Amino acid sequence: MTLMANYWAESGHDVAMATFEAHTQSHYPLRSRVKLVPTSLNSASPTIFHSILNNVRRIGKLRRAIVETRPDVVISFIETANVRVLASLFGTGIPIIVSERSNPAVYKPGKVWEALRLMLYPVASRVVVQSSRAKDYFPRRIRSLCRVIPNPVLIPEGFRRRNTIRRDGPKRIIALGRLSEEKCYDLLIRTFGRIQARHPEWTLEIVGDGPLRQTLVQLRDELRLQGRVELSGLSKAPFEKLGQADMFVLTSRFEGFPNALCEAMAAGLPVVSFDCPNGPREIIRDGVDGILVPHQDAEALANAMERVMGDSELQEWLASRAPEILDRFGIDRVMRMWEDTIAEVASVSVQFQRTQETH
């Protein structure tokens, strides 16, 4: 979202970003032209009664905060926020584009939120999903509003990929993501533990933090992988981590459109990924710019990792083709898809046409 806001701000558009937090600064850098609108709507509800009351209050406060920005169009991310935005702006006539950021067939926000999503999404101007399989989840009345728009892939300014792989010396496998159940890092650690003795030059680094950190540290220690597996915590410079790695592995149970996988390919890394729903199959061309593995098949994962680890020519081939993702999902191309969708529902098509002519 910050990437999109900065892109449009640099193109001369006025952009306001409303958050549910009270923070007056974004964790991710925002251009000065982007107005941050903290609504302080995140608060705990001890009972169902308080939850209902708080959500009614949130809807009123959110309506005022958004209307005061006088938007031509509103874009909302994440299912629970989408429901609140649609409810809060009902009757205003403001075009609303809601966007699903995960796999709706797998990630369930709860029965009440699911019912509200199916009830309110038909009043949205458009529903943006990240893959065709995510679109297929919805009933026909919502599918007709859907537009498939992948995440844009962008390399930070100044980042330089290695021209060749390292054939000698220590090598590193990297995984990026939240230390939570859906990322399945326990399986990754166990799989690496099975094959690491045959590849003493390789180590595994998992970058991220989350509720399973202590559990994963304990698993690593139980498998006696200290010194071979590192859980290095959060990083504000993931591309620096990718630039130091030699292979990327994704073991998620489900995804929306995995940014980390795209970033690893953009950084020129050989990648191995479970064919989980959704995302990897739309991103990786199996055998061309990465390796797809049957979903949750630990044996196949171990075989694929060893195949790449033991074959420098395969590493070189995959690394040379992986950056082509920047052509397929480059920011200008993806942002044109967003602008085309906005132009379908709001009276800003001429403005966006001028913006496209400048890129």
Image: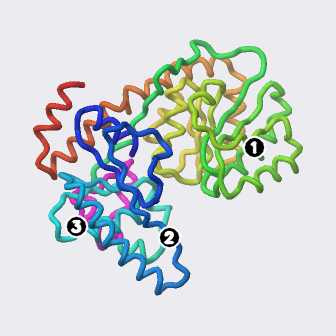
Give the residue at mark 2. Answer: 43
Question: Of discs 1 and 3, which sits in the foreground?
Answer: 3
Amino acid carrying label 1: it is: Thr
**Residue 143 included in the magenta stretch of the image:** yes
The percent coordinates of residue 37 (x first, y second) are 36, 54
CA separation in Å, label 1 and label 3: 46 Å
Amino acid carrying label 2: it is: Ser
The percent coordinates of residue 14 (x first, y second) are 24, 42
Question: Of discs 2 and 1, which sits in the foreground?
Answer: 2
Q: Quadrant of residue 8?
A: top left
Q: Is residue 303 above or below residue 138?
A: above
Relative side of 37 to 163, left or right: left
Specify the label residue 191 is tagged with: 1
- Disc with the residue nearer the chain's start (1 vs 3): 3
The percent coordinates of residue 310 (x first, y second) are 73, 24
> For the residue labelled by badge 3, is the local secondary structure a helix, a strand or a loop?
helix
> For the residue labelled by badge 2, is the local secondary structure a helix, a strand or a loop?
loop
Magenta span of residues: 117-145
Closer to the camera, 194 or 8?
8
Amino acid carrying label 3: it is: Val
> For the residue labelled by badge 1, is the local secondary structure a helix, a strand or a loop?
helix
The residue sitting at the bottom extreme is 49
- Disc with the residue nearer the chain's start (2 vs 1): 2
CA separation in Å, label 2 and label 1: 40 Å
Q: How is the rendered protein coloured?
A: rainbow
| Residue at 61% over, 13% down | 164
Note whether residue 135 is visible.
no
Q: Are marks 2 and 1 in contact (CB under 8 Å)?
A: no
Give the residue at mark 3. Answer: 123
Q: Is residue 306 above or below residue 232?
A: above
Note whether residue 137 is visible.
yes
